[in-house]
Image: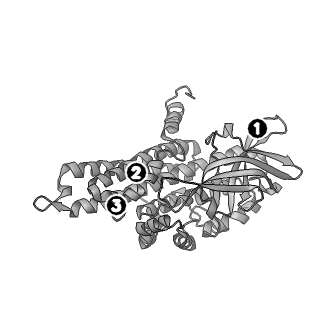
Amino acid sequence: MNFDPTPEQEQLRDAVRALGKQYGHRYFVEKAKAGEHTTELWNEAGGLGYLGVNIPTEYGGGGGGITELAIVCEELAAAGCPLLLLVVSPAIVATVINRHGTEEQRKRYLPGIADGSQRIAFAITEPEAGSNFHRLGTVARRDGDDWVVSGRKCYISGVDQAGHVLVVARTEDATTGKLKPALFVVPTDAAGLTWSKLDMEILSPENQFLLYLDEVRLPGDALVGESLDAGLPALFSGLNPERITIGAMSVGSGRYALERASEYAATRKVWGGRSIGSHQGVSHPLAHAAVQVELARLMVQKAAVLYDAGRDLEAGVAGNMAKYASGDAAALAVDTAIQAHGGAGMTTEYGVATLLGASRAGRIAPVSREMILNFVAQHVLGQEKSY
């Protein structure tokens, strides 16, 4: 097993780290508190090719894989700038369209995702069904050559910044009469599509929305793929990259928090001039959190390598484990960093409490740790399905 990155991956990591530090956490916080977006960082990352590292070169990308995109997600987060839309647009949507879209769809959407000029949101979660595609209430029906989509979605990231939304709906199979999942690329200015912002206790320049689709009429080519048979494979193809890149982002946030706390503990001196980090009551919790973050980081890297090797079943297991481990590790790292700072940890100036909401959300979204445990119990340990 080779743990050494390629020279190209090392160069990518160094370059993204440098870009992230140019902006830093203060920039991220100021944008969030002003109700603005990190447009400058996004555009520069796109112009440098970082947003499209996983997209084939023939569509304007870097020709790499999820391993490379995970590096981008991790290093921007480690600089204090975790960009959730990296997970949504380049990881989920670009993967779905590249692997299951038509050639015309790849040419239409992938170049814009790669250079950052086009953001596409992703909408699966619903108020009643959650992300259980077997129970989705959003339905698409045929009307001549068109599709008509109606339903509701919730916790949809970045709709206000996106030109399109990749919507998961259910369609009726003409042969069996059963409902099956299908994905549609919906313009955000389509008639009948509206949204409202959700107020969240998460400090982020990327917002969450409720989405309403009221008889939204779409052309036939809005359906991803050549037929309805592409729906289920297309949906699943986006889930592993989602888990891997959100895991990488959580790892990056954990690294950022520990870096801030370690610097503070090494330089804050009390009681005779000794640093607070010389006391095991401070240093041991930080060391424990560092171990957990590094373990999670290794699992993220394993999942990414398996995915890029085309070993989807193994990547599914590793991706879920990576998501679980990184969510717990980031929450622990941020909480421990705050505690190490004492009262200063709750101030904006020291830049750790500002990650508290997002790090906690990493244990819930995009799939809860409980559902991951269900998955592992069933598919790894061979236990009977519990729900």
| Pointer 2 residue | 330
Q: Amino acid at mark 3?
A: Thr
Residue name at image x 57 percent, y 42 percent: 313
Instruction: Report the Cα–Cα distance between label 2 and label 3.
Output: 19 Å
Which is nearer the eye, 182 or 365?
A: 365
- Quadrant location of residue 113? bottom right
- Could you tell me residue 299's position as x and y percent? 44, 48
- Could you tell me residue 307's position as x and y percent? 55, 50
Q: Residues within 10 Å of mark 1 (few under 14, many from 20)?
A: some
Residue name at image x 66 percent, y 68 percent: 112
Residue name at image x 42 percent, y 56 percent: 355
Which tag is nearer the camera, tag 2 or tag 3? 3
Q: Amino acid at mark 1?
A: Leu
- Could you tell me residue 372's position as x and y percent? 51, 39
Instruction: Report the Cα–Cα distance between label 1 and label 2.
Output: 39 Å
Which tag is nearer the camera, tag 3 or tag 1? 3
Contact between labelled residues 2 and 1, with CB atoms less than 8 Å apart: no
Nearest to N terminus: mark 1 or mark 2: 1
Q: Secondary structure at mark 1?
A: strand
| Pointer 3 residue | 347
Q: Residues within 10 Å of mark 2 (few under 14, many from 20)?
A: many
Nearest to N terminus: mark 2 or mark 3: 2
Tell me if residue 223 comes above or below residue 76 in the rendering.
above
